[in-house]
Image (cartoon, helix red, strand yellow):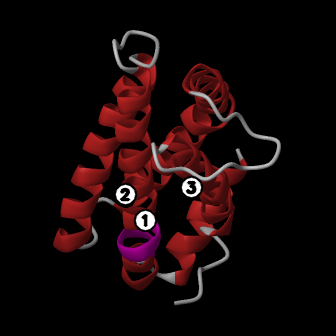
Amino acid sequence: MKRHPSLIPLSREHHGALLLARLLRKDAPLYKGLPSNAPDKADYALKFYQDEIIGHFAEEEKVISLVKGLNPELDLLIDEMEKEHVQLHELFRLINNNSDLSVHLDKLGRALEDHVRKEERQIFPMIQNSCSEELLNTIAESLKT
């Protein structure tokens, strides 16, 4: 399904999150210009979290507030999404407090990838199918501020 223009900015940001998710996994290939050992990956992940993910989650939560109540199935997915945001915030916060950093980073990478895939494959298409064009335009405007 083609992404509605109102959700394209969020979808584009998912590319960087997916790259981070793959980088953090134990079985990650070497990525040119990106860290290859656990401590450097942890530093990279924390910087990306601060610079990108915190703001991205806030933008998604603006969208959530506009579409809650439109569709019971979407509401269930939104509840899952909100719980995953809390879980991911916690996983990022715990990066430097783990006895086995590479195991923690792998867990974080898998959780982040699963979360982004769910948004792209289930939540965003359902938002597009549940919203009027007027509401999609309202979503677009909310993401500009």
Q: Residues within 10 Å of mark 3 (few under 14, many from 20)?
A: some
Label 1 and label 3: CA atoms lie apart by: 9 Å
Label 2 and label 1: CA atoms lie apart by: 5 Å
Name the residue type under label 2: Asp
Name the residue type under label 1: Arg
Q: Earlier in the sequence, mark 1 or mark 3?
A: 3
Examine the structure image and report whether residue 57 is included in the region drawn in magenta: no
Q: Residues within 10 Å of mark 1 (few under 14, many from 20)?
A: some
Examine the structure image and report whether residue 121 is included in the region drawn in magenta: yes
Residue with the mark numbered 1 = 117
For the point 41% across and 75% down, the residue is 121
* Residue 40 shows in the view: yes
Residue with the mark numbered 3 = 18
Q: In the rendered structure, are the residues bearing label 1 and label 3 in contact, judged by CB atoms less than 8 Å apart?
A: no
Name the residue type under label 3: Leu
The spot of residue 119 in percent (x, y) is: 42, 64
> The C terminus is located in which quarter?
top right
Label 3 and label 2: CA atoms lie apart by: 9 Å
In the figure, is residue 139 to the left or right of 16? left
- Report the front residue among 134 and 72: 72
The spot of residue 16 in percent (x, y) is: 66, 51
**Could you say which disc has been placed on residue 114 in the image?**
2
Q: Which span of residues is magenta-colored?
A: 120-124
The spot of residue 108 in percent (x, y) is: 40, 38
Q: Earlier in the sequence, mark 3 or mark 2?
A: 3
Q: In the rendered structure, are the residues bearing label 3 and label 2 in contact, judged by CB atoms less than 8 Å apart?
A: no
